[in-house]
Amino acid sequence: MPKTKITQTKERTREELIADWVAAQHQQQRKQRAARKRPDEVVGVTINSLMDAMFIILVFLLMNYSIDPLRVDASDDLKLPASTTEINPDPSAAVTVTAKGIVVNDEMVVQIKDGQVDKAFKGGEENSMQIQPLFDALNAEAQRQKNVSQLTGGKFDGLLTIIAHGETPYRLITEVLYTAGQAEFQKFKFAVVKGGARGGSPE
Amino acid sequence: MSWRNKKTVDDTIEDLNLVPIMNMVVCLIPMVLAGTALIKVGVVNVNAPKFGQGAATPDETDEKPLNLTVAVGDDGFRLTATGADINQVLGIDPAMAAAAAQPADPTQPPKEGAFIPKKGEEYDYVDLYNKMVKVKSQFPQETVMNLTADARVPFKLLVNVMDALRVKLEQDTYGDLAGFKSASARIEEGAPALLWPDVVFAVAQ
């Protein structure tokens, strides 16, 4: 090829030929570079900065998630009342009172119907305040905490967090408190949603 | 042959394919956000309730404890105290107090204490606050308030009562709900001035 080219362009100077050759070399290099780049271009848009930001957000959220001592999964059966309180929850045993049942350590211990616990579960008596399955569960929890505190040299503080549905009747709340008191829990904290207004929050 | 293989292996090395990880992260973030950021959970401290006629703790001083009780009923709040005449403390005329104590049903015993009726459908938290500040001004050392309610009163009403009476606000009395809602806590010696912070849940016998 070069030979024929030379014969065709006899009049061209040596400099022109060199310039042609250099230009051809450059073009080839550019093609090669483009070919090498192509796989990158398939991934396309530069998402690296976005990735960084998202990863940081994810780590931050996960940290918060694990630090939170109290997890409440709100639903129609468990709407916490709003309050103006500034106190943060402490890690402690928790009893959840929903519209359908009482839950201790993720286990349903007794069912609630129309805001009441069936009389069969109340230590056999009509007007008894003690909810027997709840007492059994809390008593086991208290014993476990006492054993742990004995081994670690701490003290059983008798702290119980109660996560109660806002519509729970007062009678049921007192029954839960009484039962917890029988199981040697003495200090109670009620979980609420922060940011309520004084004088009743609008629904 | 082997040389060729090496060459092809070299050619396939590229950047990590981050697309699946990206997908996962994009899915995880809304999930975690929905789970945590929206609800900020706090707590309200409540002391162990007194049940039945438990022996009262003997007081070293001769002073009788006030034993102030706020009862939440279907029709309003009722303030009672065993340590003092609540109507006298609030400056309510005895004749009016006696008339208010007379129940509509004559077979029922007269109701004790000061009554704060509902305003329409709403409980009157403003009047409750005004009256409780008055009681506090005469018994500045008292911090314990018994709280009780009718059996069917929902628990969130009790939280509202505790919110209304936890701290002193800028004024001692408020005329309307709007002013009461927008008021902020009074600061005394660098901390909010407490009104009736120690709540004991009691059961009406």
Image: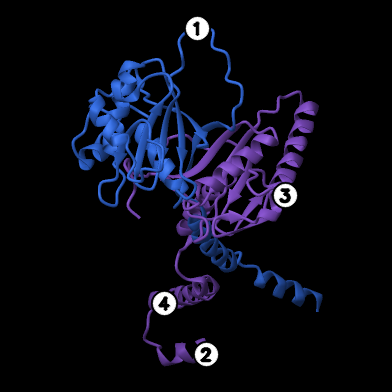
Q: Secondary structure at mark 2?
A: loop
- For label 2, the residue is A1
Q: Earlier in the sequence, mark 2 or mark 3?
A: 2
Quadrant assignment, res B189? top left
- For label 3, the residue is A124
| Amino acid at pointer 4 | Arg
Q: Residue at x 55, y 73 (%)?
A: A39
Q: Earlier in the sequence, mark 4 or mark 2?
A: 2
Q: Which mark is residue A14?
A: 4
Q: Residue at x 51, y 75 (%)?
A: A42
Q: Nearer the viewer, mark 4 or mark 1?
A: 1
| Amino acid at pointer 3 | Gly
Q: Is residue B172 visible?
A: no
Q: Secondary structure at mark 1?
A: loop
Who's blue, chain-wise?
B
| Amino acid at pointer 2 | Met
Chain holding disc 3: A
For the residues labelled 4 and 2, say whether their Cβ atoms are less than 8 Å apart: no
| Mark 1: few/some/many CA within 10 Å (<14, 14-19, 20+) | few
- Between residues A163 and B157, which one lies in front from this camera angle? B157
| Amino acid at pointer 1 | Thr
Q: Nearer the viewer, mark 2 or mark 1?
A: 1
Q: Secondary structure at mark 4?
A: helix
Who's purple, chain-wise?
A
How far is disc 2 from disc 3 in space, using C-alphas?
Answer: 109 Å
